[in-house]
Structure formats: C-alpha cells, structure tokens
Image (cartoon, rainbow, N blue to C red):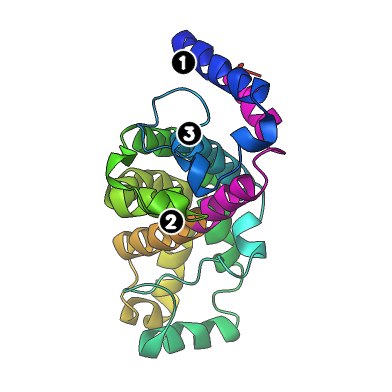
Amino acid sequence: MNGHRKFVGRRTVLTGIGAGTAMAFLPNAAHAQGIFGRRRSSSGGLGLGSILGKATDNALDKLAQPSAFYDDEDIRIGLPIVGGRSSGLLGSIVNAGNRLGVLDGLTRTINDATGVAAGEAKPIFRDAINDLSFDDAPSIIREDDGGTQYLRSSANDRLHARLEPLVDNALNEAGVYRQFDSLAERHSFIRSAGLNRESINRSVTDQGLDGIFSYIGNEERTFRNDPVGNVGGALGDLLGN
C-alpha cells in the first residue's frame, strides 16, 4: 500500500470513528455502500477490497502453518485422482492401497506441501483483488461472504493458473513426485488410477483452492460479524503496523 492510500485510508477510518464507530462499521444495508462499497479495491478506507485483502492474508497465514490442511478434515486434500478428490472406482483402488499401507504418509506430505504453496500465494491473491471492480456486484456485497464468492467467480481460473506452479514446486521439493514414481514401479494401480505429475498437480491445486476459499470466506464472515472489534486490526494495517 503506497503512501497516498495509507493517508486516504487513515483519514477515512478516523472520520468514521469520529462519527460514531459502532454505526460507521455496521454491515447492514444502510451502511453497506460505505463499508463494503461497490468501489474498486484500490480505494481507501475499509471498503470491500480492503476487507477481502485482510481476510485473504489471514486465511493464507493460517493455512501456511504446519499441518493446517491435514488437521482440518473439511479441507484435507485427498489422494489426487483424475477428476478431483478420491471417489468412484479409481478412488476405491487407491484408497484400498492406502489401507494396505502402500500410501502411508503421502497424503500428509501432499497437504503440508500445499500449505507451503499457500504461504507463498499472498501476492497472487492481492493482485486478483486489486483487479476486481465491485460496481457490478450490488447484491453480493450484502452476503456475509459475498466478497469471497465474487473473488472466486471472477478470478478462479487466473488464481488456479498462478497457484499451480507454486503447488508444483512445493510438491517437487517435498518429494511427492519421487514417491509416486517409486510406488508406481512397485504397484500397478498407481498408474492405473491415472496418476502422473500433471494430474497430481492439477488435483492438488483444485483441492487447495477449495480450502483457501473456505478459509477466506470464514475470515470475511468474522470481520463482517464483528466489524467494530476488527477496526483496530484494520487500522493498524492502514497505518503500516
């Protein structure tokens, strides 16, 4: 955030506080335009872009923690199968192998690698948020995770394309591809399930994005449900703290 935006944001926030903090930051219809307003995210103050940026940073910080993806069953990344999470015949084949201990530890390694990629993804999401215009989303801003929904519907493909290389590198550094190659030499069901570097990367990126957006939505809801309690954190961001 450059100096001009810091100045404008600080002035806007302080003006709102002077007018009555509780009213200035309540996310109801009467105040939606001022707080979650349909202005580009590059505008100052606590607009929807600012809230969405803060929600994204918080979500990625949490997911970058060790075992974050694996420990949360709602977003845990399953064994990469062509077409998505383990399901159907191919999923049954691989999960049978997992129960036999063939793939022990590999799922955790994949999840940890995705957490590494998430920790490096802040600039990607910030760029996508800065490119959004909320002028054409008058209704979604009133939903408690409306910004997250709009970001995903508007920028999902671009985010996927930019996140995929980070995931690929993290999986490679974690030795996931080497483990799959080694297992495939000894167990034919690995190749029968259509697993290769491209399909693994694509599936993990898909599932990783699902988890990231789930966490961003939670963070946005938290901010909207307690806007007054979150003013301090947002103000600190605007002042560069």
Q: Which residue is at 56% across, 66% downward?
A: 76
Q: Earlier in the sequence, mark 1 or mark 2?
A: 1
Q: Which residue is at 32% across, 48% downward?
A: 137
Q: Residues within 10 Å of mark 2 (few under 14, many from 20)?
A: many
Residue closest to the eye, 208 or 27: 27
The residue at which mark 1 appears reads as: 5
- Range of magenta residues: 214-238
Which is the main secondary structure of the residues drawn in magenta? helix
The residue at which mark 3 appears reads as: 34
Residue 225 on the magenta segment: yes
Residue closest to the eye, 202 or 137: 137
Q: Is residue 174 above or below residue 94?
A: above
Q: Secondary structure at mark 2?
A: helix
Is residue 177 among what the camera can see? no
Q: CA distance from mark 3 to mark 2?
A: 30 Å
Residue closest to the eye, 178 or 20: 20
In front: label 3 or label 1? 3
Q: CA distance from mark 1 to mark 2?
A: 29 Å
Residue 106's image quarter?
A: bottom right
Q: Earlier in the sequence, mark 3 or mark 1?
A: 1
Could you tell whether 9 is left or right of 86 in the image? right
Q: Secondary structure at mark 3?
A: helix
Residue 128's image quarter?
A: top left
Q: Which mark is residue 209?
A: 2
In front: label 3 or label 2? 3
Whether residues under marks 1 and 2 lie with C-beta atoms below 8 angstroms apart, the answer is no
Residue 20 x %, y %: 67, 28
